[in-house]
Image: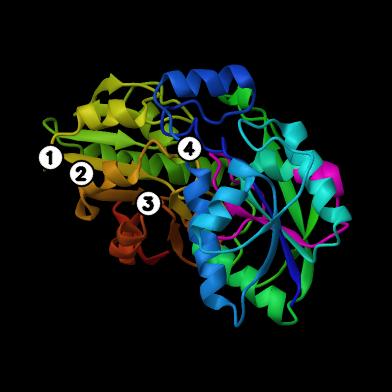
Amino acid sequence: MKRLGLIVNPVAGMGGKVGLKGTDGNDILQRAIELGARPVAPDRAIEALRALRKGSTGSPDVLTCPREMGERAAVEAGLKPAIIDGVHGERTTAEDTKRAAKSLRDHKIDLLLFVGGDGTARDICHAIDQEIPCFGIPAGVKVHSAVFSTNPRSGGELAARYLEEDVPLVDAEVFDVDESELRTDRISIRLYGYLRVPFRTANLQSAKTTSPMDIDEISAQEAIAKFVDEEVQDDRTYIIGPGSTTAALGRRLCFQKTLLGVDAIRGRTLIGRDLSEQAIMQLIDPGRTSIIVTPIGGQGFIFGRGNPQISAEVIRRVGRENIIVIATKHKIHSLKSKQLLVDTGDLGLDQELNGYIKAITGYREFTVILVAS
């Protein structure tokens, strides 16, 4: 059997639920911890590795890093990994990730599985470029790159298949966003390179794409916003996710929507701006709250990418019946998967969210589209 290398970035995604849009840098990580952030990557790693075990005909041969950088997740998933030297394995830095990737490459692994976000993918790309096949299990806040599985389970299944069968390899883009720019509501996305990834359409997400902001797209967003404005109830709370389409709604309702954060209105009055998960929970009025989201361009995710503040707990409290999806026809038609995706970190909720939903795509216009996990 081929040999799997594993790297877990234990701090990936910790800034998401507390509204920090990432954890790049020790100062931001410390702030996230002070705000009550908890690790999310280890559980995502365990879920992926359990799917790997289930999909393997024998016991997978795993080589990983000490402690939190892979060892604990592998053991928790029921594996018996070999451990490399030379990395600390506790609160890690980008240099630890790069060092681990080079060490695993030198140990002649056949596939590198990493758990993190776009920053982790960028570190892997910097360290080993396209020397060995690899792909990521999504655990970060920013997961725009095309090198990630759609969720941990599909990632584990893809790893098992690659280790035992012939799976073609393709070059997939590694993007990253400047987090300091994100926190000031500006987007600065850069292509850092490519990784060689095993390719199966059902298992890998697409890269994030942006809609062309021409007159037709702007008019379509304004038409959606006009219709939603007419439907807004004065005694109802609306949790509004990030995106340019929801920003158009903010302009229509006469408030400045945070482009990359989560805001809340009651009726047409802004009651919360750039909210954390905890702040959202405090604003929910059971039975009188809706969530308004727009899918990520190209990928189709409505939950689990870019809006971790709208957590599984928030969604359960609000209820599936109170989710409002808004998207232009161009965005819907450009989705490579031809469906909307969810990856909330709660398998049971993901399954509950599956099924068809009406997306508002114009003024009193709807498109029925499948939601899948």
**What's the distance in space between the residues labelled 4 and 3, CA to CA?**
39 Å
On the image, numbered disc 4 is attached to which residue? 39
What residue do we see at 46% from left, 65% from top? Answer: 339
Please give the label number shown on residue 317.
2
**Residue at x 48%, y 37% (from the top left corner):** 39
The crowding category of the residue bearing disc 4, from other C-alpha atoms within 10 Å (few below 14, some 14 to 19, many at least 20), is some
Alpha carbon distance from label 3 to label 2? 28 Å
Could you tell which of marks 3 and 2 lies nearer the N-terminus? Answer: 2
How many residues crowd mark 3 within 10 Å: few (<14), some (14–19), many (20+)? Answer: many
Contact (Cβ within 8 Å) of mark 1 with mark 2:
yes
Circle 2: residue type: Arg
**Crowding near the residue tagged with mark 1, few <14, some 14–19, many ≥20 C-alpha atoms within 10 Å:** few
Q: Earlier in the sequence, mark 1 or mark 2?
A: 1
Give the labeled residue for mark 1.
286
Q: Is residue 117 visible?
A: no
Mark 1–mark 2 Cα distance, whole angstroms, equals: 7 Å
Which structural element holds mark 1?
loop
* Residue at numbered disc 3: 362
Q: Nearer the viewer, residue 18 or 284?
A: 18
Observer-nearest residue: 318 or 156?
Answer: 156
Vertical comparison of 263 with 209: above or below = above
Disc number lying in front (1 or 4): 4
Q: Quadrant of the N terminus?
A: bottom right
Q: Residue at x 43, y 34 (%)?
A: 38
Whole-percent x, y for residue 267 in the image: 19, 29
Using the numbered discs, state the Cα–Cα distance from disc 1 to disc 3 in whole angstroms: 28 Å
Q: Nearer the viewer, residue 254 or 152?
A: 152
**Upstream in the sequence, badge 2 or badge 4?**
4
Q: Earlier in the sequence, mark 1 or mark 3?
A: 1
Q: Is residue 144 within the magenta segment?
A: yes
What span is in magenta? 124-150
